[in-house]
Image: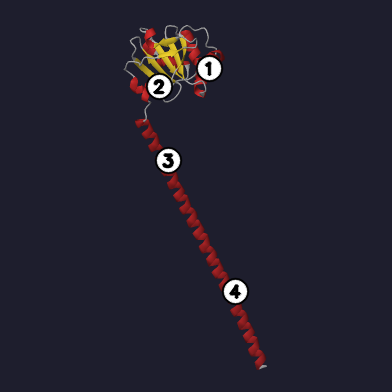
Amino acid sequence: MRAIHIISIWKFTYRVDERQGEMSVERSTTRLQNIISLLVIVLLVAQTFLLVLVLFDLKAYKQLLLSSAGSSQADPVELLVGTQAPNFHLSDEKGATLSLADFAGSPILLVFTSHECRYCQEMYPALKQFVEIESDIQVFTLSVNSIDENNEFQKEFNLIGHGNLHILSATPEIFEEYSIIGTPTFVAIDGKGVIVGTGSVGTLKQIVELTNEIR
């Protein structure tokens, strides 16, 4: 009986120890899971913080680029305002050679353009309106296109029959001489041949405002 009692006590003790061991393992597992969860939360917070820093730095860098571009990359053609307009001799859509000197004393609007330029194509209807209402201003479009291409362009945008509109075949050298870096670019020249205004505009109102000083 004593042996049986001892065995029973041993079995009970073993079960208690086993249960305590299981509970200890469970507690260790729970503790480990809690630690892992805490680490994951810390990592997520750190990742979010780093992402905010990166986005802030990118925004600041973008603002720096924009401010730098605005202060140091002004349109070069603007530097020509107040100077004598460079003369040229170019062929118009009829094959005749024209120059600025031929129109001395008249207000002139040069429109540097490209027939393939989407912004230019959107601007042409406004230019057509301007030519029709401002017959005293001589308007020259200058593009690096052939006479045949200019004739097709003239027909496509219905720019035929305007005595004050001249569609010229320009050269890259003329674009460089006027410091043109993009199209469309407008250059307003007064009757004395002095450049009084420049800009990249696209509406009738903008064109009219640009040419206020040469009327």
Mark 2 to mark 4: distance in Å? 89 Å
Residue type at tag 2: Glu
Find the distance from the CA under tag 3 to the CA under tag 4: 55 Å
Count neighbours of disc 2 (C-alpha within 10 A) and say few if under 14, some if 14 to 19, many if 20 or more: few
Disc 1, SS: helix
Give the labeled residue for mark 1: 149
Task: Please state which of the two labelled residues, at mark 2 or mark 3, is closer to the viewer.
Answer: 2
Q: Mark 3 or 4 closer to N-term?
A: 4
Q: Earlier in the sequence, mark 1 or mark 4?
A: 4
**Tag 4, which secondary structure?**
helix
Where residue 23 appears, as percent x and y from the top left, is: 58, 73
State the residue position of label 4. Answer: 22
* Residue 110 image position (x, y, % from top left): 42, 15
Q: In the rendered view, does 17 fall on the left or right side of 180?
A: right
What residue is pinned by disc 2? 173
- Where residue 179 appears, as percent x and y from the top left, is 38, 23
Name the residue type under label 4.
Answer: Glu
**Compared with residue 4, is residue 121 higher up or lower down, i.e. above or below?**
above
The residue that mark 3 highlights is 59
C-alpha distance separating marks 2 and 3: 39 Å
Of circles 2 and 4, the one toward us is 2
For the residues marked 1 and 4, what is the alpha-carbon distance in whole angstroms?
A: 90 Å
